[in-house]
Amino acid sequence: MRTVTWDPEIPSVRMIDQRLLPEELVLIELWSPQEVADAIRQMAVRGAPAIGATAAYGLALAGQLSRAHNAQELWHDLEIAADILRKARPTAVNLSWALDRLLKKAHTAIEEGPQAMRQMLIEEAQRLADEDIEINRRMGQHGASLINDGDTVIHHCNTGALATVDFGTALGVIRTAHEQGKQIHVLVDETRPRLQGARLTAWELDQYGISYEIITDNAAGYFLSRGQVAAVFVGADRVAANGDIANKIGTYMLALAAQDTDVPFYSVVPTSTIDLSISSGEEIPVEERDPTEVLDLKLKGKPIAPKGSHARNPAFDITPNRLVTAFVTEVGVLRPPYREAIARAMKETQTK
Ligand code: MRU
């Protein structure tokens, strides 16, 4: 089942409301770019590739809703919608990447008029979504060779079907190894404060029949230091040209512990997550979310902190390239030095 789809009849964007999982599997329908942007901001849909595909459908929706009679008017409406969608979340570059890709495509049809542009937007959004699944499958094949039969691996956040259009990135690698018949055990970081690991990754692993246990984020270092972990697998929301990565908060500490214990640390990313315009991780914008996400957690129905407590809630952190053993991309496994390896990989995707 796809995380996000286009309904041509209405038209609308349909998606799984990830806020309600694992208790309920509910589909929501979105009728405007503003609703799509709100769904991204409120994390009804989350995960870099899923956000990108959703934004693409949001822009296709803008094309359908626009009353523009000529190409120039439509282009103006598309730019406004793209701006609203772009601002929904700042860190995952797939959002801007998808919008720019659709805008570029629509621009090629300006001479043909607004109807051609509208049609092109829908087709390009569908293509982007289909490609996402194909790319994930390819990353799965490349990455599965990094997992041996009998391995226990640590996984952070959710990078599965829910974080993409389908199949997943880091979790896609784990799924592929499982499909190849390897016995794998996954230690699932619960991933505070939104608990994408405990809620979403565990829900997915249950369905795939892959063995797992949920651990507190703080416990990862313990298992690594005991020699019980063969590898760490994460995704990324943005990779800088030098290989520094922004990923879910907690990734940096996990990478530090992996390095200290000599455990390989892999980041599985489609090339759409690589941002060559950003030289190093320092320049990546890091989203800081509402402190209530930290403070509203309850323990046995009771608030976890004294009333009136303040909190900080960065949603991502930056892991320097020196802590990344390798990247798994759709064009293969990239090893250091990353600036060169990444540049080569990006060139390869452009010539395809
Ligand atoms: O805040 P989220 O849940 O959108 O963060 C998601 C992550 O950090 C994932 O690791 C990343 O997007 C890669 S998902 C394939």
Image (tube, rainbow, N blue to C red):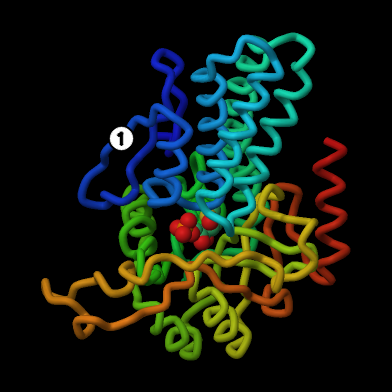
The quadrant in which residue 265 appears is: bottom right
The local secondary structure at tag 1 comes to strand
Q: Where residue 349 sits in the image (x, y, percent)?
A: 80, 43
Please indicate whether residue 307 sits to the left or right of residue 138 in the image: left
Q: Where residue 61 sits in the image (x, y, percent)?
A: 51, 25
Residue displayed at 43% across by 29% down:
32
The amino acid sitting under disc 1 is Leu
Asked whether residue 190 is in view, the answer is no
Q: Where residue 21 sits in the image (x, y, percent)?
A: 28, 50
- Quick one: quadrant of the N terminus? top left
Q: Could you say which is closer to the camera, residue 299 or residue 143?
A: 299
| In the depicted structure, whether residue 130 falls above or below residue 208 | above
Q: Which residue is mark 1?
A: 27
Residue displayed at 33% across by 67% down:
293
How busy is the neighbourhood of tag 1: few (under 14 within 10 Å), some, or many (20 plus)? some
Please indicate whether residue 208 sits to the left or right of residue 351 in the image: left
The quadrant in which residue 38 appears is: top left
- Quick one: quadrant of the C terminus? top right
Please indicate whether residue 39 sits to the left or right of residue 307 in the image: right
Please indicate whether residue 283 sits to the left or right of residue 221 in the image: right
Residue displayed at 70% across by 15% down:
71
Asked whether residue 251 is in view, the answer is yes
| In the depicted structure, whether residue 103 falls above or below residue 196 | above
Residue displayed at 71% across by 55% down:
274
Q: Could you say which is closer to the camera, residue 27 or residue 68?
A: 68
